Amino acid sequence: MSQGKSVLITGCGILSAIGQDCGQVLDSLLQVRTGVGALKYLKTEHTEFPVGEVKLSDEEMERLMGIAPGSPTTRTALMGMIALHEALGQAGLSRDDLKECGFVNGTTVGGMDKSEQYYLDFIENDSRNAYISTHDCGSCSEMIADRFGRFKMITTISTACSSAANAIEMAADMIRLGEADVVVAGGSECITKFHLNGFNSLMILDHEQCRPFDAGRAGLNLGEGAAFVVLEEASHAAARNAKALACLSGYGNACDAFHQTASSPDGEGAYLAMSKALKTAGLKPSDIDYVNAHGTGTPNNDESESQAMLRVFGKDLPPVSSTKGMTGHTTSASGAIETVICILALRNGFLPVNYGFSNPMENGIVPNMDLNRGCKLRHVLCNSFGFGGNDSSLVISAVE
Amino acid sequence: MIMEQKTLVKILSAKQITIQNPLCEDWMENPLSYADDYVRAVDPDFKQFISAGDARRMGKLLKRALATSLSALQEGGIENPDAIITGTGFGSIENTELFLDALVREGEQLLKPTQFMQSTHNTASSLIGIHTKCHGYNSTYSQKGLSFDSALYDAWMQFRIGRIKSALVGSHDEMSPVFSGFVRKAGHVKAGEICSEAAVSVLLASGGDNAYCTLEGVKLLDIPSEDILSKVLADLTAGGIDSVMTGMSGNPENDSWYGFLDTLLPGVPQLRYKPLFGVNFSSSATGFYAAACCLRNGRVPSVLTTDGKAIKCDNGILVVNVVEGRHYSFSLLKPCGK
């Protein structure tokens, strides 16, 4: 396979339970501070579940983004705008520059937060019709993008919890093929009653703080948030003196082809995704200095992902952690949120800690619990796995 | 820069379950016509594709997605495509609606996991992956009426980058009575248009015999300037085309979005498929399918024209889709050997 142009990351933006920009998220990671706690913003009967909510109301986010109160918008779109704002600012891209940039967003929930609120109005009257148009995934991407200008093209990937990772992969393909010099990619997803109840019906929510890779793990904590990275072709970045934060050196997408909501015992899809990512990066397993695992905290995922990592890395298993104990599982956004976390780790020389872990699981990996500040990371791997076995891995590398 | 050789992509097969007779090309000669403005797809007998037990657990979208996929794979002679890429605007909206309705009306205590599982947009792509045991590239796009086009664009890139030699690309949307009302209110389906359902699967490969046609290029644009449109059209039509397959439906607002074709491709006959297949988020897949069928048969049936005049099929068809006046997609299909 031809490599094509190299893909730099020249901007990133993040909004999550552990911070509302890169600086705050970095601080939380270094302090090993969780953002998971009691429900505050979502109105649900299920107050028993801890969640990783973004600590802003919709109204506060509207104010931050200068959206007039009452304009039809959704929480997912608002969160996406805040993260995109930071990413574009960091990359130094102006409104005018966007005409040459692609935009690939990942979401699955889309505007469900408003649909579950106004569903009966949609049926019975015309008072909330504007929110019918914000229900679907594509409209969410349009709202996020339109806040900043006109992009060259827009599309939306919806592969459940690997949506944002696949958005980043598609964006990288576009750059490698010369379809665009700059593509902004990532994902956004708010917590809704719809999927809180969906995950609850599947019995994969932990009633306590989640514990990825722990023997006593009992499920995931839902989180929410958004993150975007600006992917840019190297010579284009050089020509406009854009600073590279990192480079996307490899990526892989594979299908577990096992079950709609469960992962295979041997983690075949995850194994293939990681192997492809290493291969496209031209790296050996021993070149990887850290793995940001999907690590949801469900018994099934962590076991399957452990097997897959042991198959890929064997005795060369690098430090591994799941950061979902701090952020919660940010579902469609998680691939981008964790990509930004990986970039922060690369640039600031530390290993994110697997918050919530205490006892090793049988036949599993033992996650990293030491920040190891001052360490030098060259290449890190970031895993995102979705329902349906949509498994994706990204290799993010330091730039000199 | 990738030193790219010309990428050869053939359409080996294309299958539909729509408001026309399913899994066949009857519509070319004997189209079904409807007076209603909301019409559900004509389902085939699913038994030949899916066991009764499996079928009971699947919503309509999943059954149709699997049937069109397996039928396309069978005709194209490929069991395990290298990539499975799917578009859907709403996903399995019937199960989504059942879950949402129960949530809103009955509260948060007795909700059904199967409905939730099927509400996720990528269930079709992953179901096809599970059924065909394909561990390769698998992705799902959900960008309103641009969902199929996005999936096709991704497949086109996968071929160009050299990652795959075959891809099953589909787009699937079902429409419940309740959501058919919603999409009217939202203006996704307009006055004079039939709100419909569609499942389309297309098998693409870099080789193979008896192909319908070849795919020569795919382009997506958002809110392009006239200059950009002009350049893109000039590039795509440099080798000559016989007609443009448009998403014109007869609705004046929708059709006005295609006005640029009169200026930029003057004299090129404009075909329309929406009167035959109706309108839904997977509509553009039916247009792509219709164009591939025309090239396969070497003729454009009069049902796709407004005046019944004969239109050649020698050089190729440009499939043009405009969504909400802002998203544009272009895909160029050529007869094999051109």
Image (cartoon, coloured by chain):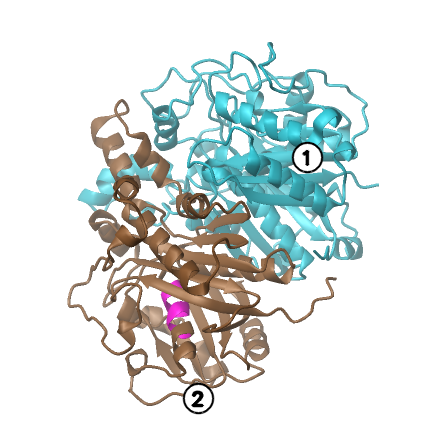
Residue B49, how many percent across, how many down?
Answer: 32, 52
Q: Is residue A199 above or below residue B69?
A: above
**Which residue is pictured at 38% across the width and 87% down the height?**
B311
Q: Looking at the picture, which amino acid does disc 1 mark?
A: Leu
Q: Is residue B218 visible?
A: yes
The answer to whether A290 appears left or right of B120 in the picture is right
Residue A251 x, y percent position in the rendering? 65, 44
| In magenta stretch: residue B285 | yes
Tell me, yes or no, whether dots 2 and 1 are on the same chain. no
Q: Which mark is residue B267?
A: 2
Q: Residue at x 76, y 28 (%)?
A: A348
Give the total number of marks visible in the rendering: 2
Using the image, determine if residue A300 lies above or below residue B213. Answer: above
The residue tagged 1 is: A381
Q: Choose between B22 and A336: the one closer to the eye.
A: B22
| Tag 2 near tag 1, CB within 8 Å | no
Graded by Cα atoms within 10 Å as few (under 14), some (14 to 19) or many (20 or more), the crowding at tag 1 reads: many
In terms of depth relative to the viewer, which is nearer, A135 or A94? Answer: A135
Taking the image as drawn, is residue A18 in sight? no
> Label for residue A5?
none
Which residue occupies the foreground of this view, B113 or B213?
A: B213
Q: Position of residue A192 (x, y in %)?
A: 39, 31
Q: Is residue B207 depicted above or below B40 in this figure?
A: below
Q: Secondary structure at mark 1?
A: strand
In the image, which lettered chain appears cyan? A
Magenta stretch: residue A57 in it? no
Mark 2 residue crowding within 10 angstroms, few (<14) / some (14–19) / many (20+): few
Boundaries of the magenta span: B284-291
Of the 4 image quadrants, the one containing the N terminus of chain B is: bottom right
Residue B32 found in image quarter? bottom left
Which one is closest to the eye, mark 2 or mark 1? 1
